[in-house]
Amino acid sequence: MATKKLNAASIGRNSAARATTPSTPLLTEEGDEPIRPIQLQPVESSVYQLLYELNAGFENVIRHFAALERVEYLWDDKLNATRNVICRAQAEINFHVLEPISERELSNSTWYDRLCLEWERESRDPDDVLIEAERIKQQQGLSGSKAGSKPAG
């Protein structure tokens, strides 16, 4: 099983001296290329606006179909089938449009997660390591004493 290693930036305040950047992959397989490139891929608000307007248009058409269906002499199975085709088209368009948007947003989330991790790493209090080590030591002591105090039998 290949082990994963973290491509950690050098800890220091000088960002120019960093060996990695936010576009450098966070995880790699030993000796392999990066698992997934991390890069910022903005999604313009106009894309969301267009998707909103498209869906509002579909809803308007569907609402008109419902109104036509209430007219007794206009309703028939073909009208209902046509409305279903339009609803299916809306669902398929949303699915196909949202798939690349979701991928881009996931990439953006990963980008900003990495920036936050780098900031947290750089601003970490050195005493936090000692506190964490003491907490682990106490947990190991408690789990060791529980294991030793089990009754035989």
Image: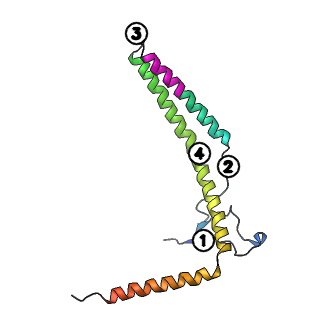
Looking at the image, which residue is at 62% across and 65% down?
Answer: 26
Mark 1 Cα-neighbour bin, 10 Å: few <14, some 14–19, many ≥20: few
Looking at the image, which residue is at 52% across and 85% down?
Answer: 134
Q: Secondary structure at mark 1?
A: strand
Q: Which residue is mark 2?
A: 42
Q: Which residue is mark 1?
A: 6
The answer to whether residue 37 is visible is no
For the residues carrying marks 1 and 3, which lies nearer the camera in this image?
3
For the residues carrying marks 4 and 3, which lies nearer the camera in this image?
3
Q: Secondary structure at mark 2?
A: loop
Q: Which amino acid type is marked by label 4?
A: Pro
Cα separation, mark 1 vs mark 2, equals: 25 Å
Q: Which amino acid type is marked by label 3?
A: Tyr
Q: Earlier in the sequence, mark 2 or mark 4?
A: 2
Q: Which residue is mark 4?
A: 100
Q: Earlier in the sequence, mark 3 or mark 2?
A: 2
Mark 2 Cα-neighbour bin, 10 Å: few <14, some 14–19, many ≥20: few
For the residues carrying marks 2 and 4, which lies nearer the camera in this image?
2
The spot of residue 79 in percent (x, y) is: 43, 18
Q: Earlier in the sequence, mark 1 or mark 4?
A: 1
